[in-house]
Amino acid sequence: MTRRLQILRRAAEVFERKGVAQTSIEDIASEVGIKREGIYYYFKSREDILLELILPQSDNLLRSMRNIMATASTNLDKLRSAMEMHISSYSPGYLETTVMLREKHIFKDQKKLDALRRVWRDYTDLWEELIKRGQTSGEFSDGLDAKMVSYGVLGMCNWMARWYTPDKGMEIPEITENFFRLCSYGLMRGEPDV
Amino acid sequence: MTRRLQILRRAAEVFERKGVAQTSIEDIASEVGIKREGIYYYFKSREDILLELILPQSDNLLRSMRNIMATASTNLDKLRSAMEMHISSYSPGYLETTVMLREKHIFKDQKKLDALRRVWRDYTDLWEELIKRGQTSGEFSDGLDAKMVSYGVLGMCNWMARWYTPDKGMEIPEITENFFRLCSYGLMRGEPDV
């Protein structure tokens, strides 16, 4: 592991444990076991570190979602794949993701924040597009608002940042299956008629 | 409005705007238009103010949920009422709720935090109980895990803290209706067969 990567990984851990606002460059340096100057050699600020954690992961989500949208499968299968993809981003990169989702007020650099917002907007738009396509094709009920559905599904998944702990309680595949069934077939039916 | 209540209301606004971690007693005092000593006359710390915003609201949620559980209606109707109750807590008390939901690392007072956690645990348990009752009575599909369903439904609603803005976009009753249909009848059917 390079020093740079080591800083990023340790920073993600401290951010997760203490919250970004309560984490100083000193905290990160002491976690890595170096002096604060050693951090500044690689990063300009705490925000820089945070953004370097968040942006690539957000780009990955967006790219994965584009790939899913481009497949030839049904919209229901796309929904399942998208939920799997989104939720499983909690597993290996879970520290970065929870940090990303919990903090809101920390970017003073408006340009960088705008870049991040653009990725998230494009990502959310793709989810809405998926629901709309399913409604147009007749797979999904058109009695529901596509934007609200996508906010609901993403919210359900994102809220995991508040309760999910790896290796404790339910595992990612079971959570995904439960959430997918809840959204697709609903509590009143729960599973497809087979 | 009493001075005490005025402090609480202004504090909630600053917390929401700046984030709790970035808000000082001075910020709150200047928002109220008094000196910081004026705050300390009523509250010991920023945490004290925050807890006084969060605890009564959490108690209210719990009490409302108990009332809903005690009604004679079907479990599906109870689910609708519970979602309405939970989501509508965003409307008048929305500032306090979003503050409450966004912050995690700010309580150093373990006893107070435990009290709050107890209320939230009891509240979440009641949601799980509602799903289980519906499964036992045969109203809800038993193919779904009751805890995951309650986490999913609450997550969907709680995530509103990140995107909902009063008087902008969709209104509370429409959001509630969309989320209720999504959870109960699902995307594949979307509404009851009538």
Image (cartoon, coloured by chain):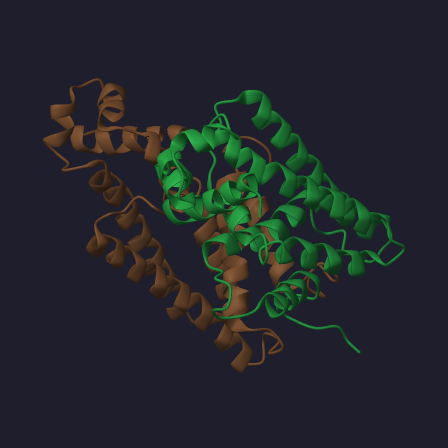
Chain colours: A brown, B green
x, y percent for residue B62? 71, 42
Relative height, residue A100 to residue A2 (above, below): below
Above or below — where is A187 with respect to B48? Answer: below
Q: Quadrant of residue B38?
A: top left
Q: In the rendered image of this protein, does residue A67 appear above or below residue A93?
A: below
Does residue B12 appear to the left or right of A179 in the view shown? left
Residue A93: percent from left, percent from top:
37, 40
In the picture, the quarter occupied by the C terminus of chain B is bottom right
Please state if A83 lies on the left or on the right of A66 as rendered: right
Which one is in front, B63 or B127?
Answer: B63
Image check: B35 left or right of A170? Answer: left
Residue at the image position 46 percent from the left and 39 percent from the top: B103
Residue B124: image quadrant is: top right
User: B182 above or below A168?
Assistant: below
For residue B105, say whether it is visible: no
Using the rendered view, name the quadrant where residue A37 is placed: top left
